[in-house]
Image: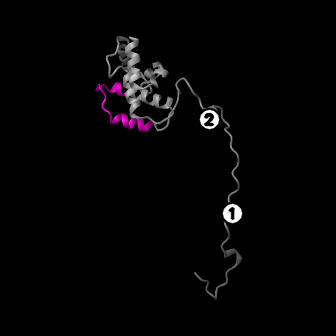
Amino acid sequence: MAQQPNLEVTDAERPRPALAPGPAKGWRAGKPGIPEGPQDVPRGGTFDVTGPDAGYGLLILSRTELPDDDPRLREVVEGLVLIRSALLGRAPIMEDIEAALAVCGYGFEPPEDVLERRMRWLAAVPHEKRPGETAVAEVDRELLVRKPAEIAERLRNAG
């Protein structure tokens, strides 16, 4: 809006330019236990390996019909799916669910030791902080990352 000619505006009433913020100051963690870089992030033990987009794995697992209606089986498979996809460095896919089921002894005639291991994993679920924690801790990682048919073949021949 234009200024009226009969009013005088003093310098104090004129708009002033806003001051720009100064440059950002450097920051470093001042407390012990705060990671300062990727090399400081804990690995192994209960931290294990995290993979990208674990939520998608939970979504496809929720839409998948499992061979047993036991809710404990879903939790064991959930843990195995997430660790398998993380070990392979990618988001979970349907093959991860098939591999987890094969490790649990589904899809083939499993030997007795595989059935006993599955029952032990299912019995441990109510006592775990994270789903399938016992299964994830006990499973052979080299076996878990193989194709589902190869997992079934190895477990069938091992018994």
Residues shaded magenta = 54-74
Residue 125: tell me if it is visible: no
Q: Main secondary structure of the magenta part?
A: helix
Q: Position of residue 40 (x, y in %)?
A: 63, 32
Q: Secondary structure at mark 2?
A: helix
Residue 156: tell me if it is visible: yes
**Mark before the other along the chain sequence, 1 or 2:** 1
- Estimate how packed mark 2 is, as few (under 14), some (14 to 19) or many (20 or more) residues with alpha carbons within 10 Å: few
Q: Position of residue 14 (x, y in %)?
A: 67, 75
Residue of label 2: 38
Q: Residue at x 35, y 12 (%)?
A: 111
Q: Is residue 96 above or below residue 19?
A: above
Distance from Cα at disc 1 to Cα at disc 2:
36 Å
* Residue 38 relative to residue 131: left or right: right
- Estimate how packed mark 1 is, as few (under 14), some (14 to 19) or many (20 or more) residues with alpha carbons within 10 Å: few
Q: Is residue 132 above or below residue 15?
A: above
* Residue 39 relative to residue 88: left or right: right
Depth check: 137 or 107 in front?
107
* Residue 66 relative to residue 21: left or right: left
Magenta span contains residue 65: yes
Amino acid type at mark 2: Pro
Tell me whether the residue at label 1 lies in contact with that at label 2, contact meaning CB atoms closer than 8 angstroms.
no
Depth check: 140 or 68 in front?
140
Residue 88 - label: none
Depth check: 133 or 96 in front?
96
Residue 19 - label: 1
Magenta span contains residue 139: no
